[in-house]
Image (tube, rainbow, N blue to C red):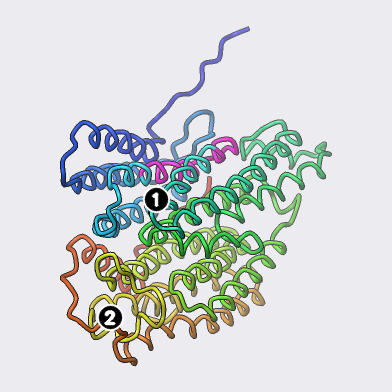
Amino acid sequence: MPLTLPEINLYPLLPALLPAATAILIMLADVLLPLKNKNWLALLALLGLGAAAYFSLVLFGANASAFNQSIVADNFALGISLVILFTGAVTILLSLDFLAARGLDLGEYLALLMGAVSGMILMALANDLIVMFLGLELLSLPLYVLSAFWRTNERSLEAGMKYFLLGAFSSAFFLYGIALLYGATATTNLESIHAAVSAPAFAAYPLFLMGAGLLLVGFGFKVGLVPFQWWIPDVYVGAPTPLTAFMSVATKAAAFAAFFRAFMVAIPTDVFDWRLIMALIAVVSMTVGNVAALTQTNLKRMLAYSSIANAGYILVALVAGGAAGLSSALFYLAAYAVMNLGAFGGLIALGQGAQERLTLDELAGAAQTKPWAAAALAISLLSLAGFPPFAGFVAKFFVFGAAVNAGYVWLAIIGVLNSLVAVYYYLHPIVKMYMNPPAEGWVAAPARTPLALGLAVVVVVLFTIALGLFPSEVLHFAQAAMVK
């Protein structure tokens, strides 16, 4: 019997390997060079992310693969990787002074963050269910620790515990789904699953459908779809604010990348038409997220419910399917990254030292004490609401347009109506900041905003405006992102 050597090609894996290698370097440097000022570790982390972004751009258009097609660096995966890497870089800038003001260790934080980024990119590159599961666990384990990173804060510890317990529960569903699909098709490769299911002699439909359903549960938990969203508000409120920003964007991007690939490649609609099920989940997620956000007085909790609604909007693109659905989803994720990072960055910038402005009452009159930070938060919220000429309006236009072109006019109408409902709770904080007198304890002139924080907020706000005014370049990039 001839010996078959495995295909070993690490080049397509470089976008995921470089953040992992950077995490190891950060841990070694933190121990071996214990300097008092650890901000230079952030520079090392940014260089690692920059190198990964460079190779993502180099690989774009090459459709490289590795390990017998279990890793596929196609344009869609690389586009998602760039969104994740950008989010990681902005999160580092948002975190520096936040951690210093609370006495939290930067080296440990950065190493865990780089590990999560590596897992997210691996999940986006995966063309095999086992590799997806490895990416899922690699991104989840650091996030469990990071959610409870503020060890002296009870809410942070509670967030870490809840995320760990529910995350482990959802991982079990996902793994069991993989086992059932393997039992039905004798493979975990997505293209091979498609070929097995499409074969005329395929008869294991009940087992296959059960496996697909359990995969949906696992993905639904990670992206925050109803009814698997219960962990999101408590975890988002308890986790450190920069990490909340990171989780709300990067985790969603990675999980949706795997979600889209698994259902568009492995589960053909001619065998099992899952589009109506996805459409109903999208409607429920949009509606529950927006209605629940209406009553929130804590802005982190409000943005948590907003993320549930936005998961519903992105799911509309999966229902639309095809090139239009895929490109609109990638554009939406890019736009959601900059406007959500802008919202959380504005919240952090409005704080003073270890004190944060998180409730509507605390935000009262914020425009008088920190006008630029209030403006950044206002622009980001207007974009999330879908006001032109910001990124959110263009993103929703493309997603709903893809749904209309695919024949789902009713789904697009429900999405538009949900966007109108969301206008109220996005405008409420803006009214508080600009129309109310300053809240007690916030009247004094604030200290100067740290350079890294100010730079991060300005950059994402400028991108929010630019994607709304000049979307064509990013849209062309997104249209080139096809799932292989």
CB within 8 Å, label 1 to label 2: no
Residue name at image x 74 percent, y 42 percent: 198
Q: Does residue 124 belong to the magenta stretch? A: yes
Residue 210 sits above or below residue 71 on the image? below
Observer-nearest residue: 304 or 409?
304
Q: Which residue is mark 1?
A: 149
- For this orientation, the residue located farthest to the top is 1
Residue 80 sits above or below residue 180 on the image? below
Q: Position of residue 362 (x, y in %)?
A: 36, 80
Residue count near mark 1 (Cα–Cα under 10 Å), binned few <14, some 14–19, many ≥20 = many
* Quarter in which the N terminus is drawn: top right
- Observer-side mark, 1 or 2, equals 2
| Amino acid of disc 2 | Gly
Query: Please, what secondary structure does the residue beneath circle 2 have?
Result: loop
Residue 135 sits above or below residue 220 on the image? above
| Amino acid of disc 1 | Phe
Residue name at image x 76 percent, y 38 percent: 199
- Give the mark nearest the N terminus, 1 or 2: 1
Residue name at image x 64 percent, y 35 percent: 188
Q: Does residue 384 belong to the magenta stretch? A: no
Residue 332 sits above or below residue 198 on the image? below
Q: Which residue is mark 2?
A: 441
Observer-nearest residue: 276 or 248?
248
The reply, left or right, for residue 319 in relation to residue 239 is right
Which quadrant would residue 439 be assigned to in this image?
Answer: bottom left
Q: The magenta stretch spans which residues?
A: 114-133
Residue count near mark 2 (Cα–Cα under 10 Å), binned few <14, some 14–19, many ≥20 = few
